[in-house]
Image (spheres, rainbow, N blue to C red):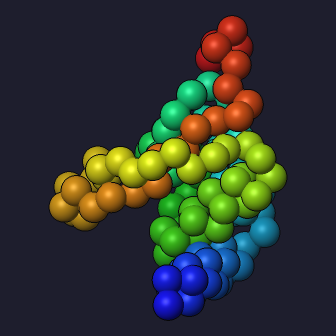
Amino acid sequence: MKQLGLDLGHAKADQAANAAGGAWCDLAYSAFHYHAKHNAQFTTEQVRNCSDVDTPRDLRAWGSIARRAKEEGMVVFVGWARAENPRVHGSVISLWESKIYDPLDRL
């Protein structure tokens, strides 16, 4: 049952990313990559808040970007963090560890 929920979540994230469009996905992935290069650990929420990528109609689109980064070995899931957005009342969100972080490559 848990796998079914994951699959459904992935499908919804992919639908949202497809609706946002290929150009948006490319920009979002570049923002995710940039954030991973400059931060050892982070959340997708932090990527969204630090980037100038337009907000997609459905924020689940960012889940598709994060999953792609994970599948490509850019990041690994290391646990949970509390969301910073007060509208989600401290929900838990994925915490990522960068595999491309370079502390010498400062902004």
Q: Nearer the viewer, residue 53 or 46?
A: 46
Q: In the rendering, at what x and y percent does residue 48 appear? A: 50, 50
Q: Residue at x 63, y 46 (%)?
A: 76
60 lies above or below 62 = below
| Residue 57 makes an appearance in the image | no
Q: Residue at x 66, y 62 (%)?
A: 67
| Residue 74 makes an appearance in the image | yes
Q: In the rendering, at what x and y percent does residue 38 appear? A: 62, 25
59 lies above or below 26 = below
Q: Residue at x 57, y 83 (%)?
A: 3
Horizontal side of residue 22 vs 58, given as left or right: right
Q: Dividing the image into 4 quarters, which one contains the C terminus?
A: top right
Q: Residue furthest top?
A: 104
Q: In the rendering, at what x and y percent does residue 86 appear? A: 20, 55
Q: Residue at x 70, y 54 (%)?
A: 70
Q: Nearer the viewer, residue 4 or 68?
A: 4
The quadrant in which residue 98 appears is top right
40 lies above or below 29 = above
Q: In the rendering, at what x and y percent does residue 95 appear? A: 47, 47
